[in-house]
């Protein structure tokens, strides 16, 4: 099973900036990407979570946004999923620690950043065009 020490060695090997913000929980930033990922070592799982954006308050209708996110979950986001958490749009992924290796960890981090980057313009346009009071 992947240990916290193994996880830290992966982060160092990938040349990522990170800080442990709670026991087993790391805030990870790559040198190129601006969106940090929370990596939580929580046996038997490793949980990755990327905050995409805050959802605007005010009761606007987000039906088109939610439909698009569900479609992206089904087609483009192979191992993770978009979700809502405390007024934030997040992109998350969970993996079993048992058998997790460096290559799979690296690919998972990269896939979250890539999905968020590829979808950001589409998501922002849907949020900004949501009718208020709907």
Image (tube, rainbow, N blue to C red):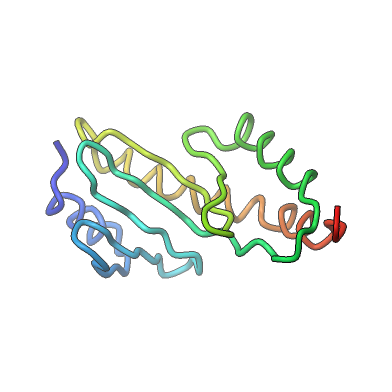
**Could you say where residue 5 lies in the image, as x and y percent from the top left?**
12, 54
**Could you say where residue 11 lies in the image, as x and y percent from the top left?**
26, 58
Residue found at x 28% / y 62%: 26
Residue found at x 27% / y 33%: 96
* Vertical side of 81 occupied by 35: above or below: below
Residue found at x 45% / y 49%: 110
Residue toward you, 17 or 63: 63
Which image quarter: residue 107? top left
**Could you say where residue 69 lies in the image, as x and y percent from the top left?**
67, 42
Q: Quadrant of the N terminus?
A: top left
Residue toward you, 75 or 90: 90
How many numbered marks does the figure carry?
0
* Vertical side of 38 occupied by 104: above or below: above
Which image quarter: residue 46? top left
Which image quarter: residue 124? bottom right
Residue found at x 79% / y 58%: 60
**Could you say where residue 17 lies in the image, as x and y percent from the top left?**
31, 69
């Amino acid at each position: 099973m992947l240990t916290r020490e193994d996880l830290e060695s992966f982060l160092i090997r990938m040349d990522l900036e990170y800080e442990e913000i709670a026991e087993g929980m790391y805030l990870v930033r790559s040198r190129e990407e601006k969106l940090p990922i929370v990596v939580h070592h929580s046996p038997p799982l490793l949980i990755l979570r990327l905050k995409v954006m805050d959802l605007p308050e005010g009761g606007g209708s987000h039906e088109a946004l939610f439909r698009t996110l569900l479609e992206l979950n089904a087609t483009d986001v192979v191992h993770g999923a978009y979700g809502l958490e405390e007024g934030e749009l997040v992109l998350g992924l969970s993996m079993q620690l048992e058998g997790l290796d460096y290559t799979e960890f690296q690919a998972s981090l990269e896939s979250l950043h890539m999905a968020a980057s590829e979808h950001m313009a589409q998501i922002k346009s849907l949020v900004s065009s949501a009718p208020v009071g709907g």
